[in-house]
Image (cartoon, rainbow, N blue to C red):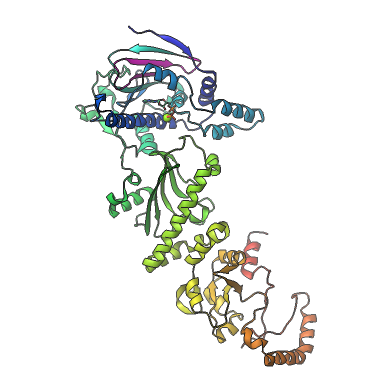
Amino acid sequence: ASTTETLEFQAETRQLLQLVIHSIYSNKDIFLRELISNASDALDKLRLESLTHPDLDADTSDLHITLETDSEARTLTVRDNGIGMTRDDVVDLIGTIAKSGTAGLLAKIKEAKENKDTDADAASLIGQFGVGFYSAFMVADKVTLHTRRAGTDQGTVWESDGEGTYTIADADDLPVGTTVTLHLKAEDSEDGLGDYLAAWKIRQIVKQYSDFIRWPIRMATQATSTGTGTGTGTEDDADGETAGTLETLNSMKALWARPRAEVSETEYHEFYRQISHDWQDPAQTIHMRAEGTFEYEALLFLPAHAPFDLFSRDTKRGVQLYVKRVFIMDDCDALMPNYLRFVKGVVDAHDLSLNVSREILQHDRQITAVRRRLVKKVLAAIKDLQATNTDSYLAVWEQFGRVIKEGLIEDRDNTDTLLELVSAASTHDPEKTTTLRQYLSRMKDGQNTIYYLTGENRAMVENSPHMEAFTAKGYEVLILTDPVDEVWTDQVPTFDGHRFQSIAKGQVDLDETDENSDEAKTDKAQQEQDFAALLAWLQTALDEHVKQVRLSTRLTTSPACLVGDAHDLTPTLEKMYRAMGQ
Ligand code: ADP
Ligand code: MG
């Protein structure tokens, strides 16, 4: 005999329910992700408990999740044979929001609303907490839950329309586990787009959000469903006897969750192709697991070639965020800086709310720490390629160097590492690029400065009159032709204690020793006297166009050249700014 009780939701729960139903999410599909994630947790718990309590006498041989639709009754059912709940559990877990801070959260949301902030703010605030189970009320006007806790005999049935009250009663003959039945709102079926009774729709949502859930998610088609939606176990679809009517929707293959030693290179590459839509193998694979206060797994790839839209303003970053194998978002910019936007992969964080928003991630200290660590890993992987597989490193640099160099402007924490990665053309060898380290190793005695010249292309830089004295005297000059070079060379002062110096800017003291010798000084004084009249005349004639006319040791064959002030924009940058209308 079961006693039916009608209970009221906690005040806070009721408010939260109203928010969930009426304003929070533009994307209703996520209700299924929430219910499947709860079912998956319940299966995890049952397996764990059966290991730690062998006397529990629970059947864990075929743990799974089943989805059923009944178009006549307009119900969608999510069933698991996991841990289940006792009647008290249901009151505690479903009837109240046990999470601390809910009241404070609601106050904040109210405040945001009073300040006429939009729903988006409410959504981002609420993202800090799970609304989980209640998201069912976004698509259902009535939710029924049947459950029996493993190791107990008494089942419980809970039902609510999400308004203010719920009923709870005993139920007999329930199997162990939980069944959640959603009585779908009529409004979602009209255009067929939000039709949660359609098999294709369910398939699509599961594929998108729950593909890597480790337990099978099976869909039972209508024919064998009795349509009662009560999950009393009479249908017995659990043993797979009705194989023809059960379809497993998820791949379950979360490669990142497996130990590295057990994953083959082919598997990594296949996974990469799947998430990147790239047909080539990646240049490098990074697979890591962090344990401790903030657990996560990361599986990242350096692609071997750049996508066509690498430089378009809204190119997407390649890192997806999962929480315990549940897909949360694509293009998670909080996890990868802009200059590593070409890195593809997955980060699975264990302790985040499924409803976490981009805004919250941006300000989350732990996420910031994860990002810092991932950046270090990626840079180390490129460094590693540089040391072990030069060809592959050069290929990566050729494809992504221009982007990685943006890091010299954006990411001051890693300047030193980034500089080690830089490869550049140089006057040393017309065929090959050089690293800065290699440049240093070839510097002339007494040379302290890294010389470079920026320009639009190699030929223009090589033929620049600025080059003459340097080539004549055997100084190596880096030839920097990416637009970003103009910017970072201005902002990064040194590499390993050696100053960067543009040979087109300011005074360049070539052969310091020579020039400062007494002989050179008298020479120079003599020359200045000889040319004083000419210089004065040039200065007057060109006054409108130049700041100063001076004698130079820069040139060997050209009679004159234009030199920028040390802090002037370079011609290429000037052109860039002009093109941008500044
Ligand atoms: P969360 O999953 O973040 O804890 P939910 O609102 O999704 O929040 O669920 C609340 C609680 O209800 C869960 O923590 C769990 O204890 C219980 N619960 C929900 N669904 C199930 C289920 N299918 N089986 C067992 N317990 C469940
Ligand atoms: Mg949940």
Q: Where is residue 278 in the image (x, y as percent from the top left)?
A: 37, 53
In the image shown, does 305 or 391 lie closer to the viewer? Answer: 391
Magenta-drawn stretch contains 163: yes
Image region (quadrant) for ligand 1: top left
- Answer yes or no: is residue 316 visible: no
What segment is highlighted magenta in the picture?
Answer: 142-165
Magenta-drawn stretch contains 506: no
In the image shown, does 332 or 39 lie closer to the viewer? Answer: 39
Q: Position of residue 48 (x, y in %)?
A: 31, 32
Q: Position of residue 38 (x, y in %)?
A: 38, 29
Q: Residue furthest left?
A: 241
Identify the residue at horizontal 44%, vertical 16% (top origin). Answer: 160
Identify the residue at horizontal 42%, vertical 61% (top origin). Answer: 382
Task: Give the total number of marks visible in the rendering.
Answer: 0
Residue 197 picture quarter: top left
Q: Is residue 430 above or below residue 374?
A: below
Q: Name the quadrant of the N terminus.
A: top left
Q: Is residue 118 above or below residue 359?
A: above
Residue 579 picture quarter: bottom right
Q: Name the quadrant of the C terminus.
A: bottom right
Identify the residue at horizontal 59%, vertical 65% (top origin). Answer: 492
In the image shown, does 254 or 571 lie closer to the viewer? Answer: 254
Q: In this view, does 121 lie above or below 225?
A: below
Q: Where is residue 51 in the image (x, y as percent from the top left)?
A: 27, 32
In the image, is 520 to the left or to the right of 158? right
- Answer yes or no: is residue 331 visible: yes
